[in-house]
Amino acid sequence: MTKELALKDIEKRLLSLASDPLFPATAVYIVTHDLQLQQCPCDPFEQIVSFEAVLLYFLIATNKIVDLSYNHEEILSFEPVVRKILKELEHLLLAPSTIPRNSTSANIIKKLEEDMHSPLFVAASFLYSGDEAFPAQYIELIPQRYKFDEKWLIDNIKINLKDLVSCMLYLILQASQQNCQQRIAPLLIPLKGVPLELIKPMKIFIEYFSTNLGDIKCFALENILQFQARPILKIDNDNLLLPPPIILMQAVCESPLYWMIKDTAYSNKAWQHRGETTVDMVFQWIKSVFGENNVFKNVLIKRKNQDVTDIDVLVIFQNKAIIFQIKSKKVTLKTKLGDLEQFKTDFSKSIQEAYNQAILSIESIKNKDSDFILDKKNLQLPSCINDYYIFCITTEQFKTLNMRLNEFLKESDKFSSIPIFALSTFDLQILALYLNDPYDFLYYLHYRKRLKFKISFSEEINVFSAFLASRLRNISEDKIYFANDFLDILNEHFQPFPTREDITNSYLWKRQDKEDIISSIKNWDNPLTNDLISYIYDYYEELSINMLIQLNRMDKERVFQLLKNPLDLLATLKLLTHKIGRNEKCPCGSGLKYKYCCGK
């Protein structure tokens, strides 16, 4: 049987299963148990993901009448039947990328490279991957994303942003406050008792984010993905069946854009606003890392009074330049369904165009033949810039994107050593939260640059979470694949946002006694200070407390001279920790006596 026929067979069986009177109660039990209460007793690999929760709700909606009153024993008897067919569908869709557990990185990468061109692999990467963001990120991002579109929402949907978010949070709060021991009740929300001020907006909210029972007629992956935009089920006039919060939040975050672009008179403005608000958010996050004087937004580059390009967000910190180019292009439905040609088109309009702009910007900085205009004034760039980093930012997760960079991205031969970071706004916000010290941020970029051709990964956040655990050291294989092995570090913190203590403690490789000395070195006033900090982190284990103390005492110019050959600096620091006569020549090589140099 071909995969297409096998998929049709599973679809037919799922629809048949959904018609069983016991199915809705069992489906809601599985969703509640696995995603709402997160108490799945089985192997974590058997736990359903968000796509499967949407699929189960989609199947419930094929019924005109739903009864959730079955007893627990009946549900438990039917549960294995539902889970079994879900697992069959997963195995079919993920068949090209089925990799045995405990496989080596080399075997994983080989298998991924073999299967990346399968339509099923492309579709499965969107369907079965993790959620795009944490709930707290959606709550913060929704009002920011549509702040320029509120008038359109009020005029056309009759709801403002505050009420839009308030309705969403009210329903989620009602679910969280119900007795979780009832197993199904947390997701079944009565409409009676809605606060007076939310009665009118709630009617609008339900109209735009709910699906009526019996409205689903045809089973297709396309229909299931479209159902995600209206994931609340209207059981009757008095009750709603709420999806897990993350699914509802994603719908509220993404759906308003689709409403607006259907308005042909407003479509262009909606896309423009999406870009502007994203640039604003990136600017604020990155400014919180590097400081107001080092981050610039909407920098226009002109050469001989001709526009060359523009930089959405530019960071100039000491001798480093980081260029952020933001594209509001969304991943199309065809791509999510596995159309590789459409994937290439979406890639070209987002990542490739952002990269091309960044390269034009870097050429202009290096050639020193252009004017950089900020708020109609010339921006003077320092002459000491010796490193560049490119960030291509998307407004949503672009699954398997990073695994395809080498294949799809048309890189400049001249700048092939420059690392490209392709990630969503959600993941960039996480990086800015945890890499909130500019030297930590630059060290992460520094080490990622060294690993550019040695690592394979789907999303940047996978590599970053491994960095928190081990700073990406001890990578001995020729190439290594980064999965989600370290994401638990982040999952524990977003309740709702990580505290300062959470962030500090997440750096599992840092030692506080060393960090106290390093903090003092970070205050050195020199364009090469970030290179020195990266050097310290590169040799973190080799540099003892005494060596760091000696480094902090050394003549700064001499330190930066020795930094040109890192091994010379390391050898010098080792010598300085030994007993040295005050009248002996200083081991740092300055030619001065120790008492007049590092022994002061």
Image (cartoon, rainbow, N blue to C red):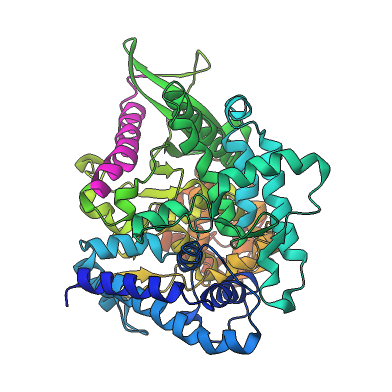
Residue 234 percent location from the top left of the image: 60, 56
| Circle count | 0
Of the pair 254 and 589, the residue shown nearer to us: 254
Q: Is residue 202 above or below residue 383?
A: below
Using the rendered image of the protein, determine whether residue 147 is visible from the camera's viewpoint: yes
The quarter of the picture where residue 282 lies is top right
Find out whether residue 25 is within the magenta segment: no
Of the pair 529 and 474, the residue shown nearer to us: 474
Of the pair 411 and 177, the residue shown nearer to us: 177
Furthest residue to the front? Answer: 65
At 61% across and 72% down in the image, what residue appears? 67
At 44% across and 70% down in the image, what residue appears? 473
Find out whether residue 359 is within the magenta segment: yes
Furthest residue to the top? Answer: 305
At 63% across and 38% down in the image, what residue appears? 143
Q: Is residue 429 above or below residue 147?
A: below
Q: What segment carries the magenta color?
A: 342-370
Residue 134 percent location from the top left of the image: 59, 57
Of the pair 147 and 488, the residue shown nearer to us: 147
Using the rendered image of the protein, determine whether residue 559 is visible from the camera's viewpoint: no
Work out which quarter of the rendered image holds the N terminus and state it.
bottom left
Q: Answer left or right for 150 relative to 120.
A: right
